[in-house]
Image: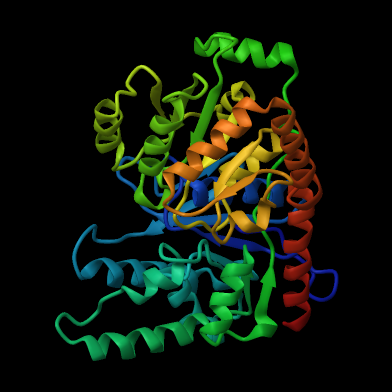
Amino acid sequence: MRSFAAGAHGSDAVPRICLCVSLFRPVVGGAERQAERFAIALQRRGIPVCIVTQRLAGQPAEETVEGIPVYRSIRAVERGALYGLTYMTTLGFFLWKNRRRFDILQTTYIYLDAIVAGFLRPWAGFKLVVRPACSGAYGDLARFDRMRFWPCVSFLDTFTRRVLLRLVQRADALVCLTRGLEKELLERAFPPSRLVCIPNDVDPLRFASPSPSTREAFRTALGIPSALPLILFVGRLVPQKGPDVLLHAFAGMIQGGPPAILHLVGDGPMRAELEALAKDLGLQERVLFVGNQERVHERLQAADLFVLPSRSEGMSNALLEAMATGLPCVATRIDGNLDAIEDSVNGLLVPLEDPEALAKAMQTLLQNKEMARRFGSAARLTAESRFASDRILAQYLETYQRLLKEK
Protein backbone atom coordinates (compact mmCIF):
# COMPACT_ATOMS: atom_id res chain seq x y z
CA MET A 1 0.00 0.00 0.00
CA ARG A 2 1.45 3.32 -1.04
CA SER A 3 2.19 5.66 1.85
CA PHE A 4 0.01 8.68 2.46
CA ALA A 5 1.36 12.11 3.13
CA ALA A 6 1.85 12.44 6.85
CA GLY A 7 -0.60 14.72 8.61
CA ALA A 8 0.13 16.54 11.84
CA HIS A 9 -1.99 15.08 14.64
CA GLY A 10 -4.03 17.55 16.65
CA SER A 11 -6.52 20.30 15.91
CA ASP A 12 -5.00 21.05 12.50
CA ALA A 13 -4.49 17.42 11.46
CA VAL A 14 -4.99 16.39 7.85
CA PRO A 15 -7.06 13.21 8.07
CA ARG A 16 -5.96 10.22 6.01
CA ILE A 17 -9.10 8.47 4.80
CA CYS A 18 -9.72 4.89 3.71
CA LEU A 19 -13.09 4.32 2.04
CA CYS A 20 -14.38 0.75 2.15
CA VAL A 21 -17.02 -0.07 -0.46
CA SER A 22 -18.08 -3.62 -1.26
CA LEU A 23 -18.03 -3.11 -5.04
CA PHE A 24 -16.38 -0.52 -7.22
CA ARG A 25 -15.81 0.32 -10.85
CA PRO A 26 -16.47 -1.30 -13.31
CA VAL A 27 -19.56 -2.16 -11.25
CA VAL A 28 -21.64 1.01 -11.31
CA GLY A 29 -24.44 1.84 -8.89
CA GLY A 30 -25.42 4.63 -6.54
CA ALA A 31 -23.02 3.61 -3.77
CA GLU A 32 -20.15 3.06 -6.20
CA ARG A 33 -20.62 6.40 -7.95
CA GLN A 34 -21.00 8.17 -4.61
CA ALA A 35 -17.77 6.65 -3.27
CA GLU A 36 -15.80 7.61 -6.38
CA ARG A 37 -17.10 11.19 -6.45
CA PHE A 38 -16.46 11.57 -2.74
CA ALA A 39 -12.90 10.26 -3.02
CA ILE A 40 -12.14 12.65 -5.88
CA ALA A 41 -13.58 15.58 -3.89
CA LEU A 42 -11.42 14.70 -0.88
CA GLN A 43 -8.32 14.44 -3.03
CA ARG A 44 -8.98 17.85 -4.58
CA ARG A 45 -9.10 19.32 -1.08
CA GLY A 46 -5.67 17.84 -0.32
CA ILE A 47 -7.01 14.97 1.80
CA PRO A 48 -5.09 11.68 1.28
CA VAL A 49 -7.63 8.98 0.39
CA CYS A 50 -7.76 5.42 -0.87
CA ILE A 51 -10.47 2.84 -1.61
CA VAL A 52 -10.51 -0.82 -0.55
CA THR A 53 -12.97 -3.09 -2.30
CA GLN A 54 -13.60 -6.63 -3.56
CA ARG A 55 -11.39 -8.32 -6.12
CA LEU A 56 -13.20 -8.66 -9.46
CA ALA A 57 -12.36 -11.08 -12.25
CA GLY A 58 -10.14 -9.44 -14.84
CA GLN A 59 -9.33 -6.44 -12.63
CA PRO A 60 -5.89 -5.71 -11.14
CA ALA A 61 -5.30 -6.13 -7.43
CA GLU A 62 -4.13 -2.51 -7.25
CA GLU A 63 -4.78 0.38 -9.60
CA THR A 64 -5.26 4.12 -9.69
CA VAL A 65 -8.69 5.41 -10.75
CA GLU A 66 -9.01 9.17 -11.31
CA GLY A 67 -5.89 9.59 -9.20
CA ILE A 68 -7.30 7.52 -6.31
CA PRO A 69 -5.43 4.38 -5.15
CA VAL A 70 -7.82 1.42 -5.33
CA TYR A 71 -6.95 -1.82 -3.51
CA ARG A 72 -9.00 -4.86 -4.49
CA SER A 73 -7.92 -6.77 -1.40
CA ILE A 74 -11.22 -8.34 -0.37
CA ARG A 75 -11.22 -11.92 -1.63
CA ALA A 76 -14.58 -13.61 -1.08
CA VAL A 77 -15.85 -17.01 -2.15
CA GLU A 78 -18.70 -16.10 -4.45
CA ARG A 79 -21.43 -18.29 -2.98
CA GLY A 80 -22.30 -20.30 0.06
CA ALA A 81 -21.57 -20.08 3.75
CA LEU A 82 -17.91 -19.23 3.18
CA TYR A 83 -18.72 -15.91 1.48
CA GLY A 84 -19.04 -13.89 4.68
CA LEU A 85 -16.11 -15.62 6.38
CA THR A 86 -13.68 -15.10 3.50
CA TYR A 87 -14.91 -11.55 2.93
CA MET A 88 -14.37 -10.52 6.55
CA THR A 89 -11.08 -12.37 6.92
CA THR A 90 -9.40 -10.81 3.89
CA LEU A 91 -10.75 -7.34 4.68
CA GLY A 92 -9.66 -7.67 8.30
CA PHE A 93 -6.15 -8.68 7.22
CA PHE A 94 -5.89 -5.61 4.95
CA LEU A 95 -7.14 -3.22 7.63
CA TRP A 96 -4.86 -4.59 10.34
CA LYS A 97 -1.80 -4.68 8.10
CA ASN A 98 -2.33 -1.06 7.00
CA ARG A 99 -3.86 0.31 10.19
CA ARG A 100 -1.17 2.95 10.68
CA ARG A 101 -1.54 4.30 7.14
CA PHE A 102 -4.94 5.91 7.65
CA ASP A 103 -6.68 7.77 10.47
CA ILE A 104 -10.31 7.28 9.52
CA LEU A 105 -12.01 4.28 7.95
CA GLN A 106 -15.39 4.97 6.38
CA THR A 107 -17.56 2.00 5.44
CA THR A 108 -20.65 1.85 3.26
CA TYR A 109 -23.64 -0.11 4.62
CA ILE A 110 -24.25 -1.76 7.98
CA TYR A 111 -22.86 -5.01 6.71
CA LEU A 112 -19.73 -7.15 6.75
CA ASP A 113 -17.36 -4.19 6.34
CA ALA A 114 -18.76 -2.39 9.38
CA ILE A 115 -18.70 -5.59 11.46
CA VAL A 116 -15.01 -6.22 10.76
CA ALA A 117 -14.09 -2.59 11.32
CA GLY A 118 -16.07 -2.47 14.56
CA PHE A 119 -14.22 -5.54 15.83
CA LEU A 120 -10.77 -4.12 14.99
CA ARG A 121 -11.42 -0.52 16.02
CA PRO A 122 -10.46 -0.75 19.74
CA TRP A 123 -6.99 -2.10 18.89
CA ALA A 124 -6.24 -0.76 15.41
CA GLY A 125 -6.15 2.92 16.30
CA PHE A 126 -8.32 4.27 13.48
CA LYS A 127 -11.61 6.11 13.86
CA LEU A 128 -14.61 4.37 12.31
CA VAL A 129 -17.35 6.15 10.34
CA VAL A 130 -20.24 3.97 9.13
CA ARG A 131 -22.44 5.31 6.37
CA PRO A 132 -25.64 3.25 6.06
CA ALA A 133 -27.23 3.54 2.63
CA CYS A 134 -30.95 3.01 3.11
CA SER A 135 -33.86 2.63 5.51
CA GLY A 136 -37.11 0.73 5.21
CA ALA A 137 -37.88 -2.72 3.83
CA TYR A 138 -34.81 -2.72 1.57
CA GLY A 139 -32.60 -0.89 4.06
CA ASP A 140 -29.41 -1.81 5.86
CA LEU A 141 -31.03 -2.89 9.12
CA ALA A 142 -33.71 -4.91 7.33
CA ARG A 143 -31.01 -6.75 5.39
CA PHE A 144 -29.00 -7.22 8.59
CA ASP A 145 -32.02 -8.84 10.23
CA ARG A 146 -32.23 -11.35 7.36
CA MET A 147 -28.62 -12.51 7.73
CA ARG A 148 -28.36 -16.24 8.55
CA PHE A 149 -25.42 -17.91 10.26
CA TRP A 150 -26.82 -21.11 11.78
CA PRO A 151 -29.05 -23.13 9.43
CA CYS A 152 -32.21 -24.38 11.16
CA VAL A 153 -31.28 -22.78 14.52
CA SER A 154 -33.05 -19.44 14.49
CA PHE A 155 -32.39 -18.47 18.11
CA LEU A 156 -28.62 -18.70 17.49
CA ASP A 157 -29.05 -16.42 14.48
CA THR A 158 -30.84 -13.88 16.68
CA PHE A 159 -28.05 -14.00 19.27
CA THR A 160 -25.32 -13.74 16.62
CA ARG A 161 -26.95 -10.74 14.96
CA ARG A 162 -27.26 -9.03 18.34
CA VAL A 163 -23.55 -9.52 19.02
CA LEU A 164 -22.51 -8.34 15.54
CA LEU A 165 -24.73 -5.27 15.74
CA ARG A 166 -22.94 -4.33 18.96
CA LEU A 167 -19.70 -4.27 16.97
CA VAL A 168 -21.23 -1.80 14.50
CA GLN A 169 -22.47 0.31 17.41
CA ARG A 170 -18.81 0.83 18.34
CA ALA A 171 -18.45 3.19 15.39
CA ASP A 172 -17.26 6.68 16.28
CA ALA A 173 -19.83 8.21 13.93
CA LEU A 174 -22.78 6.96 11.90
CA VAL A 175 -23.85 9.09 8.96
CA CYS A 176 -27.63 9.40 8.62
CA LEU A 177 -28.58 10.28 5.05
CA THR A 178 -32.22 10.83 6.01
CA ARG A 179 -34.48 11.43 8.99
CA GLY A 180 -35.98 7.98 8.49
CA LEU A 181 -32.58 6.33 8.79
CA GLU A 182 -31.80 8.35 11.91
CA LYS A 183 -35.07 7.18 13.47
CA GLU A 184 -34.31 3.53 12.67
CA LEU A 185 -30.86 3.73 14.25
CA LEU A 186 -32.22 5.37 17.40
CA GLU A 187 -34.87 2.67 17.70
CA ARG A 188 -32.08 0.05 17.62
CA ALA A 189 -30.19 1.71 20.48
CA PHE A 190 -27.40 3.33 18.48
CA PRO A 191 -25.91 6.12 20.65
CA PRO A 192 -27.57 9.46 19.72
CA SER A 193 -24.30 11.33 20.31
CA ARG A 194 -22.65 9.36 17.49
CA LEU A 195 -25.29 10.03 14.84
CA VAL A 196 -24.55 12.81 12.38
CA CYS A 197 -27.05 13.82 9.71
CA ILE A 198 -25.36 14.38 6.34
CA PRO A 199 -27.37 13.82 3.14
CA ASN A 200 -26.11 12.77 -0.26
CA ASP A 201 -24.75 15.49 -2.50
CA VAL A 202 -25.07 16.68 -6.08
CA ASP A 203 -22.92 18.93 -8.28
CA PRO A 204 -25.21 21.78 -9.40
CA LEU A 205 -22.72 22.79 -12.11
CA ARG A 206 -22.62 19.38 -13.78
CA PHE A 207 -26.39 18.99 -13.64
CA ALA A 208 -27.35 22.47 -14.72
CA SER A 209 -30.66 23.52 -16.19
CA PRO A 210 -30.29 23.39 -19.99
CA SER A 211 -30.80 26.25 -22.38
CA PRO A 212 -33.52 25.69 -25.01
CA SER A 213 -30.88 25.09 -27.68
CA THR A 214 -28.98 22.58 -25.51
CA ARG A 215 -32.17 20.71 -24.70
CA GLU A 216 -33.15 20.57 -28.35
CA ALA A 217 -29.72 19.36 -29.39
CA PHE A 218 -29.85 16.47 -26.91
CA ARG A 219 -33.39 15.56 -27.98
CA THR A 220 -32.33 15.54 -31.63
CA ALA A 221 -29.37 13.29 -30.81
CA LEU A 222 -31.74 10.90 -29.01
CA GLY A 223 -34.24 10.97 -31.87
CA ILE A 224 -37.02 12.53 -29.78
CA PRO A 225 -39.47 14.84 -31.60
CA SER A 226 -39.64 18.35 -30.14
CA ALA A 227 -43.33 18.20 -29.32
CA LEU A 228 -43.31 14.75 -27.69
CA PRO A 229 -42.81 14.87 -23.89
CA LEU A 230 -40.04 12.66 -22.50
CA ILE A 231 -40.48 11.05 -19.08
CA LEU A 232 -37.26 9.75 -17.53
CA PHE A 233 -36.55 7.07 -14.95
CA VAL A 234 -32.95 6.51 -13.79
CA GLY A 235 -32.10 3.60 -11.53
CA ARG A 236 -31.45 -0.11 -11.19
CA LEU A 237 -34.14 -2.35 -12.61
CA VAL A 238 -34.91 -4.08 -9.32
CA PRO A 239 -38.11 -4.39 -7.24
CA GLN A 240 -36.89 -1.76 -4.77
CA LYS A 241 -37.06 0.94 -7.45
CA GLY A 242 -40.62 0.12 -8.51
CA PRO A 243 -40.21 0.16 -12.33
CA ASP A 244 -43.13 -2.27 -12.66
CA VAL A 245 -45.41 0.26 -10.95
CA LEU A 246 -44.14 2.92 -13.35
CA LEU A 247 -45.01 0.86 -16.43
CA HIS A 248 -48.56 0.28 -15.20
CA ALA A 249 -48.90 3.98 -14.38
CA PHE A 250 -47.54 5.03 -17.76
CA ALA A 251 -49.96 2.70 -19.55
CA GLY A 252 -52.85 4.26 -17.66
CA MET A 253 -51.64 7.81 -18.35
CA ILE A 254 -51.33 7.59 -22.13
CA GLN A 255 -54.82 6.10 -22.48
CA GLY A 256 -56.79 9.28 -23.07
CA GLY A 257 -54.00 11.44 -21.68
CA PRO A 258 -51.16 13.39 -23.29
CA PRO A 259 -48.88 11.52 -25.71
CA ALA A 260 -45.44 10.86 -24.24
CA ILE A 261 -42.50 8.48 -24.29
CA LEU A 262 -40.73 6.86 -21.35
CA HIS A 263 -37.01 6.13 -21.15
CA LEU A 264 -35.72 3.78 -18.45
CA VAL A 265 -32.01 4.41 -17.86
CA GLY A 266 -30.33 1.59 -15.96
CA ASP A 267 -30.12 -2.17 -15.93
CA GLY A 268 -30.78 -5.05 -13.57
CA PRO A 269 -32.32 -8.47 -13.06
CA MET A 270 -35.85 -7.25 -13.82
CA ARG A 271 -35.09 -6.03 -17.33
CA ALA A 272 -36.41 -9.04 -19.28
CA GLU A 273 -39.52 -9.15 -17.08
CA LEU A 274 -40.14 -5.43 -17.57
CA GLU A 275 -39.66 -5.62 -21.33
CA ALA A 276 -42.25 -8.40 -21.43
CA LEU A 277 -44.61 -6.33 -19.28
CA ALA A 278 -44.22 -3.32 -21.57
CA LYS A 279 -45.12 -5.52 -24.53
CA ASP A 280 -48.16 -6.96 -22.73
CA LEU A 281 -49.34 -3.42 -21.93
CA GLY A 282 -48.90 -2.37 -25.57
CA LEU A 283 -46.12 0.07 -24.73
CA GLN A 284 -43.34 -1.22 -26.96
CA GLU A 285 -43.56 1.89 -29.18
CA ARG A 286 -43.63 4.26 -26.20
CA VAL A 287 -41.09 2.75 -23.76
CA LEU A 288 -37.37 2.47 -24.39
CA PHE A 289 -34.96 0.53 -22.16
CA VAL A 290 -31.60 2.21 -22.73
CA GLY A 291 -29.45 0.37 -20.14
CA ASN A 292 -26.64 1.98 -18.19
CA GLN A 293 -25.43 5.30 -19.57
CA GLU A 294 -22.27 7.29 -18.91
CA ARG A 295 -23.71 10.71 -19.78
CA VAL A 296 -26.91 10.68 -17.76
CA HIS A 297 -26.89 14.48 -17.44
CA GLU A 298 -27.56 14.81 -21.18
CA ARG A 299 -30.68 12.66 -20.91
CA LEU A 300 -31.84 14.64 -17.90
CA GLN A 301 -31.40 17.86 -19.85
CA ALA A 302 -33.45 16.42 -22.73
CA ALA A 303 -36.32 15.28 -20.48
CA ASP A 304 -39.56 16.98 -19.48
CA LEU A 305 -40.30 15.02 -16.32
CA PHE A 306 -38.44 12.76 -13.87
CA VAL A 307 -40.18 9.91 -12.05
CA LEU A 308 -38.96 7.85 -9.07
CA PRO A 309 -41.53 5.20 -8.01
CA SER A 310 -39.26 3.50 -5.42
CA ARG A 311 -40.54 1.25 -2.66
CA SER A 312 -37.56 2.13 -0.45
CA GLU A 313 -34.70 4.64 -0.71
CA GLY A 314 -31.71 5.98 1.12
CA MET A 315 -31.34 9.30 -0.61
CA SER A 316 -31.56 8.85 -4.37
CA ASN A 317 -28.63 10.27 -6.33
CA ALA A 318 -30.80 10.19 -9.45
CA LEU A 319 -33.50 12.29 -7.77
CA LEU A 320 -30.98 14.91 -6.61
CA GLU A 321 -29.47 15.04 -10.11
CA ALA A 322 -32.90 15.55 -11.68
CA MET A 323 -33.67 18.31 -9.17
CA ALA A 324 -30.34 20.02 -9.91
CA THR A 325 -31.21 19.89 -13.62
CA GLY A 326 -34.40 21.80 -12.86
CA LEU A 327 -36.74 18.97 -13.82
CA PRO A 328 -40.19 18.67 -12.25
CA CYS A 329 -40.14 15.43 -10.26
CA VAL A 330 -42.71 12.87 -9.16
CA ALA A 331 -41.64 10.49 -6.39
CA THR A 332 -43.18 8.11 -3.89
CA ARG A 333 -43.95 9.34 -0.40
CA ILE A 334 -41.22 7.39 1.43
CA ASP A 335 -38.21 8.12 3.64
CA GLY A 336 -35.45 9.75 1.63
CA ASN A 337 -37.74 11.26 -0.96
CA LEU A 338 -39.47 13.16 1.85
CA ASP A 339 -36.12 14.76 2.74
CA ALA A 340 -35.74 16.18 -0.77
CA ILE A 341 -39.26 16.76 -2.14
CA GLU A 342 -41.86 18.96 -0.48
CA ASP A 343 -45.18 18.03 -2.02
CA SER A 344 -46.64 20.68 -4.35
CA VAL A 345 -43.68 22.98 -3.67
CA ASN A 346 -40.71 21.51 -5.56
CA GLY A 347 -42.35 18.34 -6.89
CA LEU A 348 -45.20 15.90 -6.36
CA LEU A 349 -45.32 12.97 -3.94
CA VAL A 350 -47.60 10.00 -4.49
CA PRO A 351 -48.57 7.02 -2.31
CA LEU A 352 -46.57 3.82 -2.49
CA GLU A 353 -47.82 1.09 -4.86
CA ASP A 354 -50.43 3.37 -6.46
CA PRO A 355 -50.18 3.38 -10.29
CA GLU A 356 -53.32 5.50 -10.62
CA ALA A 357 -51.98 8.27 -8.39
CA LEU A 358 -48.64 8.13 -10.18
CA ALA A 359 -50.35 8.37 -13.58
CA LYS A 360 -52.40 11.35 -12.42
CA ALA A 361 -49.33 13.18 -11.09
CA MET A 362 -47.40 12.64 -14.34
CA GLN A 363 -50.37 13.77 -16.40
CA THR A 364 -50.83 16.88 -14.25
CA LEU A 365 -47.26 18.05 -14.77
CA LEU A 366 -47.24 17.30 -18.50
CA GLN A 367 -50.47 19.23 -19.04
CA ASN A 368 -49.69 22.17 -16.72
CA LYS A 369 -46.44 23.61 -18.05
CA GLU A 370 -46.43 26.56 -15.66
CA MET A 371 -46.71 24.27 -12.65
CA ALA A 372 -43.95 22.06 -14.07
CA ARG A 373 -41.71 25.09 -14.62
CA ARG A 374 -42.35 26.36 -11.08
CA PHE A 375 -41.63 22.99 -9.48
CA GLY A 376 -38.50 22.54 -11.58
CA SER A 377 -37.12 25.93 -10.55
CA ALA A 378 -37.86 25.22 -6.88
CA ALA A 379 -36.20 21.80 -7.16
CA ARG A 380 -33.07 23.40 -8.63
CA LEU A 381 -32.98 25.91 -5.76
CA THR A 382 -33.33 23.08 -3.21
CA ALA A 383 -30.43 21.18 -4.78
CA GLU A 384 -28.22 24.27 -4.73
CA SER A 385 -29.05 25.37 -1.19
CA ARG A 386 -29.19 22.03 0.65
CA PHE A 387 -27.37 19.34 -1.32
CA ALA A 388 -24.52 21.08 -3.16
CA SER A 389 -21.31 19.02 -3.09
CA ASP A 390 -19.15 21.68 -1.43
CA ARG A 391 -21.64 22.05 1.41
CA ILE A 392 -21.84 18.30 2.05
CA LEU A 393 -18.07 17.80 1.84
CA ALA A 394 -17.59 20.52 4.46
CA GLN A 395 -19.88 18.60 6.84
CA TYR A 396 -17.81 15.42 6.39
CA LEU A 397 -14.55 17.29 6.96
CA GLU A 398 -15.96 18.88 10.09
CA THR A 399 -16.90 15.41 11.37
CA TYR A 400 -13.43 14.04 10.56
CA GLN A 401 -11.70 16.91 12.37
CA ARG A 402 -13.89 16.39 15.41
CA LEU A 403 -12.96 12.70 15.51
CA LEU A 404 -9.24 13.48 15.18
CA LYS A 405 -9.44 15.90 18.10
CA GLU A 406 -11.03 13.15 20.20
CA LYS A 407 -8.17 10.86 19.18
Give residue 83's quadrant in the image. bottom left
> In the image, 134: left or right of 3?
left
Q: Nearer the viewer, residue 169 or 382?
A: 382
Give residue 363's quadrant in the image. top right
Instruction: Decide: is 49 above or below 297.
Output: below
Q: Residue at x 72, y 65 (%)?
A: 15
Q: Residue at x 59, y 31 (%)?
A: 305
Q: Nearer the viewer, residue 128 or 195?
A: 195
Q: Is residue 68 visible?
A: no
Instruction: Decide: is 170 above or below 79.
Output: below
> Residue 274: x, y in percent?
30, 35
Q: Is residue 154 visible?
A: yes
Q: How is the image coloured?
A: rainbow
Looking at the rendered image, the quarter that the C terminus falls into is bottom right
Q: Nearer the viewer, residue 138 or 294?
A: 138
Instruction: Decide: is 189 above or below 64.
Output: below
> Residue 92: x, y in percent?
42, 72
Give residue 371's quadrant in the image. top right
Considering every residue shown, the one lying at the far left of the view is 152
> Residue 69: x, y in percent?
55, 49
Q: Residue at x 51, y 54 (%)?
A: 351
> Residue 65: x, y in percent?
54, 41
Considering every residue shown, the one lying at the far front of the view is 256
> In the image, 247: left or right of 270?
right
